[in-house]
Amino acid sequence: MKSPQRLGHLVEMFQGNQPLVDGLVVLFLEHTPKLLSEFLTLVREGRVNEFHGVSFRLKSNLRVLGFPDIRNLVESIGASLRSGIPASELEPELQALETALLGACQQLREPL
C-alpha cells in the first residue's frame, strides 16, 4: 500500500511501524466512504440534530490521516447547516467534499 507524503507524520509518530500505518489506512478506506455517504444524506435531508456524531467521526478520520483541507470543508458545511443555511444552498460544497474525499481515498488505494 502506498504511503503518501502526508502519512509520513504517522510513520514517524509510530516509530516507523509501517504495518500500523497501513492498518489505519485500511480502516480509513473501509469506514470513511460510508461516513461520507451518511453525512451527505443527513445534510441533504436537513437533519441537523443527527449529523453531529457522523461529522465528528469524519473529521477525526481526516485529521488522523492528514487531510486538513477536507476536514475544514466538513467543518464549514456543518457550521453553515447549524447557522440555518438550507441544505439546497450547500450542494456545491457537498459535491466538492464528495469529490475531494473520494479522491483522497483513491490516492490512498494506489499501489506502491
Image: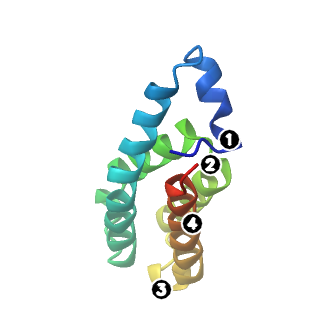
Q: Are marks 2 and 4 in contact (CB under 8 Å)?
A: no
Toward the viewer: 80 or 55? 55
Q: Position of residue 86 (x, y in %)?
A: 47, 80
Which residue is situated farthest in the top direction here?
15
CA separation, marks 3 and 2? 26 Å
CA separation, marks 1 and 2? 8 Å
N-term-proximal mark, 3 vs 2: 2
Q: Which residue is mark 4?
A: 103
N-term-proximal mark, 4 vs 1: 1
Q: Amino acid at mark 3?
A: Ser
Q: Which residue is mark 2?
A: 67
Q: Amino acid at mark 2?
A: Phe
Q: Are marks 4 and 3 in contact (CB under 8 Å)?
A: no
Q: Which residue is mark 1?
A: 6
Q: Residue at x 47, y 86 (%)?
A: 88
Q: Amino acid at mark 4?
A: Gly
Give the answer, above or below, for where 14 lies relative to 45.
above
Q: Are marks 1 and 2 in contact (CB under 8 Å)?
A: yes
Q: In the picture, residue 95 is in which quadrant? A: bottom right
**Dot 3 lies on which element?**
helix
N-term-proximal mark, 4 vs 3: 3
N-term-proximal mark, 1 vs 3: 1
**Dot 4 lies on which element?**
helix
